[in-house]
Amino acid sequence: MQAGAGGVRADAGGVLAAIAEPGGKVVEVVCAPGGPEVRLGCRGAAGPYLRAPLRGLLTASAGRPWHIEPAEPGTVHLRRPDTGEAPDASGTPDAGGTVVVTARAGGLSAELDLAFTPDGLLTLTTTWRNDSGTEITDVAAGLLLPLPTQDAHVTMPGVLYNDNPSSDPARKVPRIPYVAEEHRLPIPAVNAAWDGRYVSLFAHPEATRDREGRVTYGSLGVVRSPGPTVAALTGVIMFDGEPDVCYVSKAEVADRPVGYRDLAPGATITTHHTLDWGPVEPRGLGFRTLVHTRLYPAEPARPLSADEIVRLKTNAMDARWNGDGYLAYEGTRHDRPRSYLYGWTGQCMKLALCDALLGLDQDERDEPERIQRAEQGERGEREGIQRAEWDGRERVEPERVERARRAADFYVEGSATPVRGLRAARYLVDEGRWEMFRRDGADFVSSRALGETITDLAALTLLFRDAGLEVPPEWEEAVTDAAAVFWHTRLPEGIVPLGWTPMGTPVSPMVSAAGISCVQAMLGAYRLSGERMWLLRAEEVLGHYHRLHAATFERPFAHATLDASGEDKEAGMYFFLAAHELFRLTGRETYARWAEVAADWLLTFVYAWSPEFDRGSTFERRGFKACGWPSVSVQNHHLDVFFPTSELMEFGRATGRAEYAEQADRILHAMGQGICTEPGDWGFRTPGEQGEGFFQTNWQRTGEANTWNPSWVIALPLYHALRMRKVS
């Protein structure tokens, strides 16, 4: 092997080029028995972190379908930043140089430059050039980093978590081998961890537009070549090992040859990536390095203040009030009957809690505006504006307080089932009857939905009690009865089941994180009763969830969404919330650590950058920014507002972890996008309404939002905006 510029030769095992950074990371290109290879290491570590043979480090193919075609290595040399000349061949790592590797694949030549940044990250700049003299069509080129083990723990934010082990094998969801468009990834990166070590490859996405204004990006994933290999490509994709297959909707794929490039003679393609590596234990926590590596400076949109979000969402909530509860849907869309829905997409009890928060402790800053609007008569009545009564420094709105009371009474009085503690989840308004959820054609009680609702009922009870209001004893009894069922029907693993049959037996023996919201309900029982038993039980159950899911993340949080069957953000949400609450109640640092790890896992679902959108799309016309928005699950690749935003801010403030509080503020304001501000805006007639899904990638309708608006799209942003506005 010849080391380019200086004509230096190295014997087998010799160093061809090397660079280092002050923190101890080292990059070497060495001669090895199987041929020259790049080695990533750390000073003092036993052996390299990663070894990548030069033959196959770069790949390029022409024609469809794309395939892995190893590029043949050319030269290697070290370029100094001052003179650009190669140093001597001593093998001593250069502190400020650039390793330059060349290669060739057919009519394409390539140059890969590797250099450290001042903060110890390795930049990789790859330039492919058509040297053939004729156009080369359907080019797919990229970088390949082979992993040293078959079972590395791989994270691709938002879409792939340790190969998604809890996902239903009968459904199509991303699994290795898988290559996705960069704009499908909230953090465009791949993290692989094994044996106490991790390597993270980050992309720096650059949009390419065709003549029609359509946008394409590069792609990232893991392929078999022949073993598991991290791949950074120029835009081509793969699903389940099949090239040109795109994941397009819930468990649906379609043939879609995207990402191919045509290169005229002399034309080039340049890509930019960053590599990071270091120790991690356990390996399943490697994803945390993705969240805390700050490479994407994009700021989220801030179209509305917290006050404006509260005003608009309150208006939408008022429009849903129906005498005994809040309608789960606006009208009877999608042939769904009028209903009150508790937990999951309905959040009827969360809306009651919001009404009570508004009624008992309204922020004074919007008082003049609300009084003026209320005095406008018909408009005030239409938007549900209510007169305020002052009590000292706080303002009480009796109508809102009584509305919250009525909603809670209606639920507690009517939703009971023959099994004490289990409750129906839906009330059909026009039929005057309660019903359960359905699973596999049979009735069942969802632990996730019931846990959510009982948690909110406990919070409402505490709010009334703290305000000196009369609280029906049946409310606390409902909380305690549910907590007792949660405790006494646990699976052998010590956790709450996915749900229960109408007879009160677990509906499935499957281990999942669906029932973690029930731990919060147990803590609600503790706060209401003061009985330490409930605190100890909650600690025990959350400990089992930690052991099963969060200690190593071999089996990440999954199965909280009722319309999916796999790893999802909402399952991790409830672990974070329960750990956060236990930290507040006990002050134990263990729970702060658990909450912090869960927060990082959740933040892998949050966009750290903002992709561009096709010309003429709604998002392009309205300047929509994905930065700050959370995506949903490994099955559902869209954006939504379901996130523990205010609790993340509280946790950051309470623990001195300012980055979490700052991130929560960005998330709240980013999700102000898509809120209807006047009739007709975003396709809604009622100000404050907002779509459930925002489509930022090639999953459903790219660059568009839907108008499906179950009431959780009102409840969650309103609840968090109320709490965060008060803190600020």
Image (cartoon, rainbow, N blue to C red):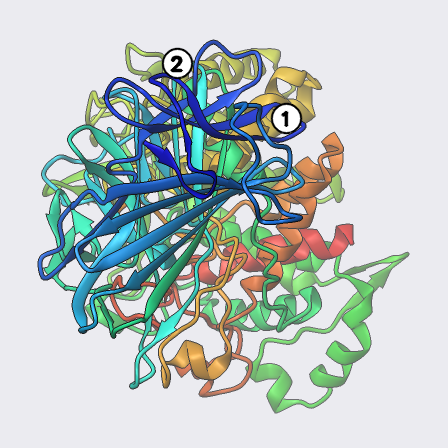
Question: Nearer the viewer's eye, disc 2 or disc 1?
Answer: 2
Q: Label 1 sits on what residue type?
A: Arg
Q: Quadrant of residue 362?
A: bottom right
Element carrying mark 1: helix
Q: Is residue 610 above or below residue 538?
A: below
Q: Is residue 36 above or below residue 110?
A: above
519, 322: nearer the viewer: 519
Q: Position of residue 89 (x, y in %)?
A: 51, 27
Q: Which residue is disc 2 drawn over?
A: 195
Q: Label 2 sits on what residue type?
A: Asp
22, 149: nearer the viewer: 22
Q: Position of residue 230 (x, y in %)?
A: 30, 37
127, 411: nearer the viewer: 127
276, 4: nearer the viewer: 4
Q: Quadrant of residue 584?
A: top right
Looking at the rendered image, the quarter that the C terminus falls into is bottom right
Q: Which residue is disc 1 drawn over?
A: 527
Identify the residue at horizontal 45%, vertical 15% (top origin).
Answer: 196
Identify the residue at horizontal 26%, vertical 17% (top origin).
Answer: 33
Element carrying mark 2: loop
Please give left or right for residue 536 compared with residue 216 in the image. Answer: right
